[in-house]
Image: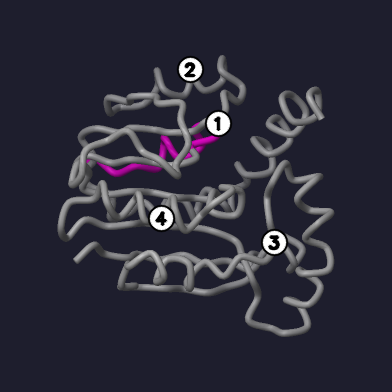
Amino acid sequence: MGLYADIIFPRLMDWVMDSPRIREQRTLTLHEARGSVLEIGFGTGLNLPHYPRDVVWLTILDPARFLPKRVTRRISSAYIPVEVVHQSAERLAFEDRTFDCVVSTFTLCTIPDPLAALREARRVLKPGGLFLFLEHGRSDDPRVAKWQERLNPIQRVIGCGCQLNRPIDRLIRDAGFPLMRLERFVMSDVPRLAGEMYRGIAEKQ
């Protein structure tokens, strides 16, 4: 898995996840980002061009170091100051009430303990802070969900830990976030098993 996980898979995902349709979803998701922002699971930095001008500082966090030259170029092109932190989202090395927003895009499917990561995100948000998310996950259609369950063991291997069947909205609520907005849709031109989308905003109260 070394060659595949470290070189082939990151390049493949960087290409797939930078389609015009997904770029549009990133812009919609990040529209309300503001102030000091923490992005968990930044991957190869594809969100960077989509942050609005209301963001004054961005901390991007990922335990992996995917395509470092490409990420460095993207960071150097960003209009906002960017701090890179390589650590797990399940235990964040930040003080309570540090950030105005926390962002997660296509990340909760892969984090080993997503509930712990979401609780940490809530901890480091200021009161009234926003959790902005764009994720794929478990379908509301029982037939699709059944196939997601069947194929999830294979997906975890070929997707380097990515899982098809996580109920994103339930995880967010279980972490103590009231959902302010939740949109469910199927991404066009993506197999439905992986294209069941959750986009929304939760608030720390």
- Going from N to C along the chain, the mark reached first, 4 or 2, is 2
- Kind of element beneath mark 4: helix
Task: Give the residue number, with chain letter if any, for mark 1.
Answer: 44
What residue is pinned by disc 3?
164
Please identify, in this view, whether the residue under mark 4 or under mark 3 is nearer the observer.
4
Q: Which mark is residue 22?
A: none
Give the spatial CA distance, label 1 vs label 2.
9 Å
CB under 8 Å between discs 4 and 3:
no
User: Left or right of 99: which side holds 29?
Assistant: right
Q: CA distance from mark 2 to mark 3?
A: 30 Å
**173 relative to 73 in the view: left or right:** left
- Residue kind at label 4, given as amino acid type: Leu
Q: Seen from this angle, which residue lies furthest left? A: 127
What residue would you read off at disc 4?
118
From what the image shows, is residue 26 above or below residue 60?
A: below
The reply to whether callout 2 and callout 3 are in contact (CB within 8 Å) is: no
Between disc 2 and disc 3, the foreground one is 3
Q: Which residues are magenta?
A: 42-53
Q: Main secondary structure of the magenta part?
A: loop
The answer to whether 35 appears left or right of 189 in the picture is left
Magenta-colored stretch includes residue 109: no
Real-space Cα separation, disc 1 to disc 4, in angstroms: 21 Å
Q: CA–CA distance between discs 4 and 2?
A: 27 Å
Mark whose residue sits in front, 1 or 3:
3
**Could you say where residue 136 lies in the image, as x and y percent from the top left?**
60, 61
